[in-house]
Each structure stands twice: as C-alpha cells, then as structure tokens.
Image (spheres, rainbow, N blue to C red):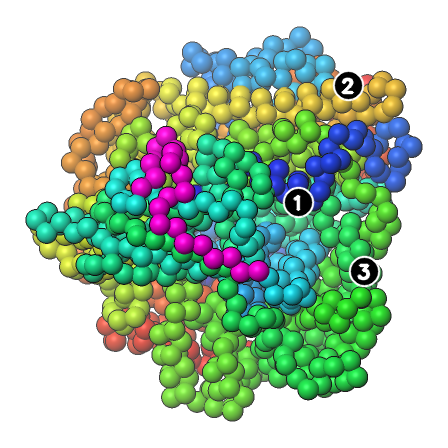
Amino acid sequence: MLQLAAPLLASKANYITEIQPILQKRCYACHGPEKQKGKLRLDTISTDLINDRKAARHWQDVRSAINLGEMPPEEEPTLSADERRTVLSWLNSEIKSAADSRKSKGGRVVVRRLNRAEYQNTMRDLLGLDISFVSDLPPDGVSVDGMLNNGSALQMTGIQFEYYLKAARAALDHVITTTPAPKVFEYTFKKSTENKWHRKTKPSNRLGKDQEFIARIKNDYPETGEFRIRIRAKGEFNEDTPGPLPRMRVMVGYRPDTEVYRKTLAEIDITEKGWHDYEFSGRMENFPLPVKGQGKYPGLVISVTNPYGGHPVIESLEFKGPIFESWPPAHHRQILHDSVSRSESFEPDYVREVIERFLPRAWRRPVTNDEVIRFTEFFKVVRKEMPTFEEAMKETLAMALVSPHFLYILEPFSAEQRPLTQHELAARLSYFLWSSMPDQKLLSSADSGELSKPDVLTHQVDRMLKHPRSQQFVENFVSQWLDIDALDRVVIDQKIHPGFKPELKGDMRRETFAFFSEVLHRNLSAENFIDSDFVTVNSRMARHYGIDGVMAGEFQRIKLTAKNASHRGGLLGQSSILTANSTGRDSNLIKRAVFLRKRLLNDPPAPPPPNVPELKTADPNFAQLPIRKQLEIHLHDPACADCHRNLDPWGQALEQFNAIGLWREKIIRPIHGKKTIELEVDANAKLPDGHKIQGISGLKNYLKEHRRKQFARAFVSKILTYALGRSLEFSDETLISDLTNQFLKNNLRVRDLLVAVVQRPDFQTK
Amino acid sequence: MDSRKPWHLNRRTFLRGIGATLALPSLECMGSEALNPSPKRLAAIYFPFGVSMAPADSGKASWNWFPEKAGADFKFSKPLSPLESLREDISILGGLSHPDVRKIDGHDSGDTFLTGCDLLGRDLQNVQSMDQIAASQLADKTRFSSLVMSTDGGVGEPTRSSTLSYNEQGRPIPALNQPRQIFERLFGGGDESTARGRRRLRSAGSMLDLVLDDAKKVRSHLGQHDKEKFDEYLDSVRQVEKRVDRSQAWIDLPKPELTDQDRERLKLESDSNVPEDYVGTMYELIYLAFRTDSTRVATYQIGSMGDATSLSGKFPQLLGFGKNIHSLCHDWNKPNGIEPLGKWDQFLSRKFAEFLTRMRETPSNADGSKSLLDQTTILYGCSNSTTHNNKNYPLVLAGGKGLGFKHGNYHRFEESIPLANLHLTMLKKIGITADKFADSNALIPEVLA
C-alpha cells in the first residue's frame, strides 16, 4: 500500500496554514499556554511524529478523542465537518507515515523464508517427487500489501522449525528407497465391478447423467508410488443439437460407507469421433486411500463420471501401478547416484560425491569445501548411530533442508547496495516467475556468469514464462493481488441461489487465472483487467454467464459481443471477484468498493476508526430499504461519512450483479425465513470526484478514461511488491514512476512489464 | 471428493497398530509430576467482533449478552443460557478492557487480548502473552509447554492476528488449526516411539548444533534489518534444541492412550466448513491435553478479526444465522439483527458450556474430590463489546474453584480497572511468579474466595 507521505516540508507548511488555526480556535483554550487539561498542551507539542515518539502518542490520543466525538467536549462548540475532516486527514497521514518510516527497511529486500507454496514447489523440483510436503506447516503471515512473499511478514518460530525438520525427514524417507522393487499390479476392467452403487448414481459404461463407471480393486493395489490409468472411450456426438462436449472426470478414492471419498485425477474432453485411448497418471500418496480390508466397500475405487452432460462411452479401463522405469526409482538415483565409489571400501568418497551433488542444487549456488566438510563430518557422526548407509545419508541431507541456505533466500549484506551474484539473481528470477528453485538451464547460465547480461536475461524471462511452471506465478500472484481465496470464505446461500453448486467456485477461480494467463502470455494490455472484449470461460462458466456456444471443459477465449454479454469484460465482470465480495446472499457493496480501491487502484480506504459510535437505526423498516438508503444512514454521522462518501459509490455501480455474479434486473432480497421483497436495481453512482456514472459499463469507461494512469501505477506497484518480496517505500518513488511511465507508453503490455522489472537495477541489487 | 472424513481416524489408528490396545484403560495423568494430585492449568478462548447488546427498549433486550442485573442473583441472558447449569463454576464480568488498547482501531484489538499492550504506540510489536508467561514457567512439567490453536491457523498479520499467543520476544506463535495434526502431536505414536525415531532424536542434537553454528556465521554477514529477521531463525533452532532435550526426558514415557469413547467424540477430519464439529473437536483436544497432563496451558482463537481473511467468518452462515460474523455483529442494534447475533452468541456459549461440562465431569485427582475444571482457570471472551468498540469486553471467567476462585456472580467493573488485573490474578492463582502483568495495578478480589 503505497500511500506516500507528503515530503516533510510540505507537511509542515500544511500544519501551519491549515491545522494550527483550527487547533488554535478549538483546542488551545484548554490545551494551550493557559490551561493544560489532561496534561496535554497542543501549541508547543512537536509535530515530528517520526522522531518524537512521545508526541506521536499524544497525537494518537488526539485522533481518538476527535474520532469518538469526545473532543471538543459537549459544552464547547463542535468541530465543523470540514475542520474535522482537515484535522483527521492530517493526523491519519502523519501517523501512518511515522509508522511506515519506523518500519522502513531502507528500500532493501529483507532476508526471506520460502513461503508455503515456494517450499512445496522447491521440494518437488529438488527431489523429483510430486507429493505434498507442507501438510503440517502453518499458513504464512500476510503482509500489509496482501502478499505472501514479504520477508518481514514471513516469520519463523520453534514449532515451524520442528515441522520443517519433520517434513525434510519424511520427504527423504520417501525419496530414498531401501526396499526391493515392489510388486506391480495390473488390471483391466471391461465393465463396472459393482451392480449397484449409490442412491444418486448407477454403474454404467455409457456415462449420462447420474451414471458412473466404477472399478473397485479390493486388496491388491499399491499404497505409494506412481500409477497409470488408461481409458479406451468414445464420445456420442449429436449432430443436430450440439451440446457440451462429452467429458470424462477420473477420480480415485474409496468408499467406507455411504459417502465416497475421492479426488479428481484428471478431466478431459472427448473432441474426436471414434474410440481412443486416454492416459492419466498420478501418485497414490495424493489420493484418499482406505485401510486395507476396512469399511463396507473395502478397496480402492476408481470412478469415471461425466461432469458436463455429454455422453462418453467407456470400453475399458486399465490400472497399472506402481510404475517405475527402474529400481531404485529415478528420484532415488538422482541423489544416491550410480558410481564406482559406491562400495563399502570407498564409502567416504561416495558420501562426498553425494553431498557435492546435492548441496548446490538444494542451496541454489556453488558450495565451498568447508561447507561440504561440515556435512561429511556430520555423516561420520550419525553413521555410527544409524544401522544403514541410507539412514545416515537421509539424516545428513535433512540437515541441508533445514539449513537457512535452503529455507531462506539469503543475500549477504554489504554497506553499499551491491549487484546480486549470478546465482542470487537466478534465485530471484525463479522465485518471481516460477515460485520455485532455478532449473538446470538457469543455474548453468548463472554458472557461466552470463545471466545478468540484458539479452541473456530477457531470453531467460521469455523461456521461463513459456515454461508450464509460470502457471505458478499466475496463480500465486493473482491470488495475492486479487485475494481470490476470499471465495472460500463466503458461503453461498443455496436457498436464495438454488442453481449454484459449490463446485462452481473452482471454475470461477480458474476463469480468473486463465484470463490473466491470456493477457500475460499474449503480452496484451493490462487495460483488459478493467475492460476487455473477450472472456476466458469453459462450458460451465459460459452457462453460468448465459454465453452460448462454448462446448469445451477447457477454458478458452471467447469474443464478447453486445448480444452475448458485453458487460462481462474485465475483472469486475468476473464471478470470482463478484462472489468473493458478496455476502453469499446478496451483493456486498462495501466489500466490492474496497476491492476496487485496494486491489485495482492501490488506494485502500482507511480502516474504520476506533470506537465508532453505532449507527442509530431506529427505522423498523431498515431491512427493507434499498441499499442506497441504508448506506445513507452512515452519511448522517460525520465519523462514518468521511470515509463512506468516498467508498460506497464504487460499489453502487456494481449493483447490477448479484451475489454469485449473475446479471440481474431486479433485486430479490430475503427478509425473514422464506419471505422476500423485490427492489429495483440502482447502479447509478456519483463518484468522489463528482463524475456521475451508470452501472458497470459507466464504471469501466470512467476507469479507462480517468483512472488509467492510477490503475497503471497500481498494477506496477503490485507487480514490483511481488517481484521484490518487500513493501514499497517512499524511496521507491522514482522506480515506480519510471516503470509506470514506460508501462503507459507501451500500452500497458503485461509481459513487457515483467521484463522491464527484471531489467531494473533494483531487481538486480541487494 | 472430500478426502478428509471421519473414517480416516480408524485407518490411521489401525495402521499404528493401536487397535489391539483400545481396551486398555486410559492413563489419566502422564506428567512428570504424576504423583502431584492436582496440576494447575490455564486456558483462554477468544471469539471476534463482540456480542449482541440489544438496547432495553428494543423489545429484544433478552438477547443482550450481558445479564440485566449484576450480583449473585443475576439471571442468565439468552445468549449465555447454555451456561446456566455451570452457574457455580463461572463468573460473568462486565466493564473490563485493556486501557492502552482503547484508542486502537476497532478491529485491531484482537492481538492484545492476552497481552494488553499498547500495540499502536509500539509500531505493532507485541509483548509476551499471559499464557506464555505461564507456559515458560511450567515448561518442564509436561511434554508440551503449551497448546496454541486457532481456526485460521498460523499468525495472520499484525492487528488481524490469527493466534492469541506471543512468545518472549513478543513474536506471534503460529496456531495449529488441523485437528488431525494436533491430535498426532499430542497422542500420535509418531516417530519418537520407534527405534528410528529414537535414533533421530539423538542425531537431532548434533544436527542442530551444526545448523546453529553455521547460522551464526550467516548472521554475521547480514545487514541490520536482515539480522533482526534472521534472529527468528536462531531463536527457533534454540527452541527446538530445548524441545529435543525435553523429548529425551520424555522418550520412555509413552504418549497417553485414549479410550474408544474419546475417539468417538473427536472429529479429526472436520474443518472450518463444519463449525459444530470443528469447534467441538478443538475444545475436546484442549480437554484431552489437560486430562492427560500433556500440557497445562492452552489457547484457542475461535475466530480472528480479519473479517476478509478469516475462515471463521462464515460460521454463522453455515449454522443458518444468515450473515458472516462481522456483518452479523454490525447489526447488533438493528431490529432484525439482534436475534441472529444473539443466536450466534448462544452457539458459542453452548460449545463453551459443553467443554466446561466435560472438564467438570472429570476428576483431576485420585480421590475425585476435585474436577479438572476446579483445577483450571479459563478466560472466555472478546476484545470488542459491540463491533468496533474496544471497551467493556464480554468476559466469562470459569473454573478454578480448587485454585481459590469464587463464582456464581455477575460483576460489573469500573472502566478504570485494567483487564490485566484479571490476567495477573489468573497467573498468581496457578502459582506463577509475577508481580505485575502489562498495566496491572492490583488483583481482582471479587472473583477470589
């Protein structure tokens, strides 16, 4: 949140010309040279809130007293609304900038721990094993900017460290194998193994509504390792009435009793006629598994359903697992490699080789001889305790995984800002664009010393954005920027929105990711986030929006026309945003307004002041008033009015969308139990700067015309905050405005902005 | 679709091979002071955004959280009615708050419920919380020094903390929020029970030495801001070293066994989508941790004040009271808002009452003369009276009759009395050495026998 404090001098002038006269008139009589009620004297108190902490505390008390309406006291004339606003806004900004200044890190990146997502991805990429490593780790702290990769907010405590050690050991137990090659199970199912299944669904080869293909493997199936499912299937296509494409959803789990616990392995559209083989793979560890022999329906259950309404037909389903090309598996041999020194007589040499191979990958940089020796010595110590070589080696490597060199992005200090080393740069890049460790290509480029060359860097950024791992940037950045997880915190009232299925939240979320992805990968303008002439939807979102002709389950770009849903363009027309900022029953005008100001314009409204007197709402018909009337009650009270006047209109303009983001002509509001009332949609708003707009299209046009620069700056700030892993400070002003100007000149192209950020010295220095 | 269901309990149980031992009696008291007849304990429970304070003339005054009249003959309000059968084990307290926290923004006071510090004046840097003062003094008595839980888990962000507990440096302690994980920690056989686990416990000692040694070198190459941040890492390693040492001492004592009935009550796969089961299970875990003397200090934040970021926000919606907690609380004085909010308050009281009842039904010592509840002092409440208002916290003080507390009353206090006086009283009564806590200036004699 970059609310830059006005430079000190300007603020001083402002104090003398605007604030002091008010205080003189209203306060000095009791808190001045004559009297100092409450031991407070305001005419001589320092206005340097940054350096004088005692004064700062007095000013906080002053703010509180004014907010509460305690001062001036009842018998004295009150502050006029203007005076009140003037004094409070000065106090708010001074108190905030004093706090910001004390929190300042001198505009430099603070050492930071890998966050949960980064740790998961890094462990996966380092160990070559795609299972969860983070189930015991607590959620990360969120920074004031809403980011999860801010060094200051990512803390470490004993309990976390304990779980890091536990996770490291468990991961190595998984990766390093000490058992002989496991038995491989293979099955082919021509029809469902069950005759009856569930009161809701019936076993079948043809998958219509409420039909499933069920393959239950009672006893002999693997509990760990990779498995493969191959399905031979075709789709029934109806030439006359085209509907959604036949789509298969493959799920793996078990059924203890009435419920089936399962997770989706994959979903796929059938796009071509005729029989085809479809292959999917996963790891057993990632699916809910039964206790062998337990439950009413013992065994592993593989089921295939059709989530969209077309008709896939299954000829056969094959299961094979565990799958490995060799034994021990590749992830084992990546660490305990084949080597001539791997025999007892050469054990010390082999130990050294293993460590020399593992450490630089784990620590994302070359390691020194001393560092290697620390590990070989530790190995010697634990080797005496442990029964096998492997057990001792696991313990040794676990030490590398709880070391600060692994858990933190460490950039040693120098008094002057210094360029990052090649490997530090590689790590910054990979955590920015992949939320994970550098791959071999990036490390090689760093090894060669070429990475920081502008053309090499640009080439790497290009390559990295084309890599599937860039999806991790899309999902992490978008989630944090727009707080998409808010979707999980709203419960949709299905009595009021009977068509809504909670599953749709997943599609809503994916729509926004897909939309961002489209803009990023095609290097389109960020203006599309305000308004676009396309949406990215799958058949389910299209049906939700009432857009015809989208048959596929995959997300795709669809051009908007005046006929199909032109109001859907941009983020503000997306159900993810509209639903996340709803009450679950109706729109939440204030949340939507806060979203717009905080997330899109980087102008977050001040939080509610302390001890706000409650609204006096004697009106017994309050619940039946239009939202505008309800909110007007705020405006009677100056404590509320100051903020709400600048807030409410933004949300009013979005009133055309209901709680789940559907367009509405009428507002149906539940009053009591089943009783509802109907209200007119009122999306006319007078914005704080006096512009009058109508509804979503008015809002978008206004934003494009009058707030383009502010939005560009806000977006640049968000990307920078994420890229640098720190909050922006006053000293970043030049950086932000340079990048913003460049961004505006370049028609707000998003991929180019990422390249520009990476090319900046700020990204490349510590 | 959902993989986290109750059946898992059995699976893990059987995998651990405990199935065969289920019939064994549970070991009630596993602490190092197994002979100490009556350990003293402390718990704190928090809920966010305040309560219904229906005005007298609203026609719904019975939904006001606070009883109408103070004194020993007070009548339970509707929101508190589930606690009626516990009348002699609780005191209702009105009027208290943390004076230094009154000027902070309305929703920012949750962080200070157990610390009472002037967060704003300290740039949001908190101080050690009351429970952790107790935990550090009681640390060597139990396997775990404290149990810190919340619905959201982790630490949240300053002013929107998702934990009640702060360590010696004033840093938030991440709260655990997965019942399964908490259960495994307290009662799981886990690694420590196997030969490999024991070997690893031994090697952890030398590993942590080396890690710490290296980390100190790293620190010397860092700048000032980095150093401050990195100290968290050093402190963490040291804490775990201590824990490893302590685990060595505990290694020959098996973790406590639970009975079949205990297991039935736990819904270990429940999450914030099922508030009834989830909140109940979290309370049950505190109860079991106390009963088995696995720890003597526990905190549970039922919801955080991070309206937009809290998983608990939707609890009232899931329970059928219409709105999320924050909106519900904002409606406390609206004609149609009083009752739904009161019902939410009532739900919270009911879950609390279930917990207290469990504690009361369980003897704490061999002759059964004292219950767990008698030996535990419990603070329950919120740092807002109505939403945005940081005064007059709605509070219930429960349990501890065996520690010298006296109950069965509704006390109203002057605004000038700092809540820290109550914190200090609680600490003293469980035998903690402390002369002062935060801005305390006395004890609260009204709640003492």
* Quadrant of the rendering where the C terminus of chain B is positioned: top right
The residue singled out by tag 1 in the image is B15
The chain carrying label 2 is B
Residue A180 versus residue B156 in the image, above or below: below
What secondary structure is the stretch in magenta mostly built from?
Answer: loop
The residue singled out by tag 3 in the image is B199
Q: Secondary structure at mark 3?
A: helix
The chain carrying label 1 is B
Q: Earlier in the sequence, mark 3 or mark 2?
A: 3
Residue B117 is one of the magenta-drawn residues: no
The residue singled out by tag 2 in the image is B406
Q: Secondary structure at mark 2?
A: loop
State how far apart marks 1 and 2 are (Cα): 47 Å
Q: Check disc 1 and give the amino acid type.
A: Leu
Observer-side mark, 3 or 1, equals 1
Q: Is residue A54 left or right of residue B235?
A: left
Q: Position of residue A525 (x, y in %)?
A: 25, 68
